Amino acid sequence: MPFVNIKIAGPTLAPDQVQRLQREATRLMAEVMRKNHELTAVLVEQVDGASWTVGAVPVQVAAHLDVKVTAGTNTEAEKRGFVAEAMRLLRSVIGPDLHPVCYVVVHEVAADAWGYDGRTQADRAKEAKTA
């Protein structure tokens, strides 16, 4: 049940660019991070470029990709691979003007601290073990 939040500053993305980010982020979560494709949520947000700086200097085009996954469900190699692939995705969709200081962050959240449909991931894991 990963959640992917992609923030983009700069020129407004075309609908097909947004859809590509959503589709490819979902694919990366499934293929690289071994997450359930059907439970992967992706939110693409466009923010005012004037509000984004790096080193206190405004940037023309920037991005930040933030992922939340259950703690302990991915290896270091999977996370490293995801960071690299996600950055390639951002560059391929946004283009050469993308500022090099664009972060990809994988947040590992304790299984008892998040969930969906009113149940925590810890409860779901317990149920899966007894089934």
Image (spheres, rainbow, N blue to C red):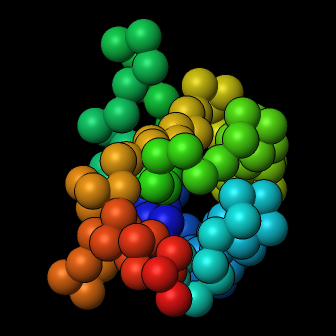
Figure quadrant of residue 81: top right
Residue 46 shows in this picture: no
Q: Residue at x 49, y 66 (%)?
A: 2
The relative height of residue 104 versus residue 33 in the rendered view (above or below) is: above
- Pick out the residue farthest to the top: 55
- Please state which of residues 13 and 129 is positioned toward the viewer in this rendering: 129
Vertical placement of residue 18 versus 34, above or below:
below
Residue at position x 46%, y 55% in the image: 70
Q: Is residue 131 left or right of residue 94?
A: left
Total marks shown come to: 0
Specify the quadrant of the image occupied by residue 23: bottom right
Q: Residue at x 35, y 47 (%)?
A: 110
> Image quadrant of residue 24?
bottom right
Q: Residue at x 78, y 58 (%)?
A: 32
Q: Nearer the viewer, residue 24 or 110?
A: 110
Foreground of the two, 45 or 42 = 42
In the image, residue 99 lies at what x, y percent? 62, 31
Q: Position of residue 89 (x, y in %)?
A: 75, 56
Q: Provide residue 45's location: percent of width, then percent of height.
A: 38, 63
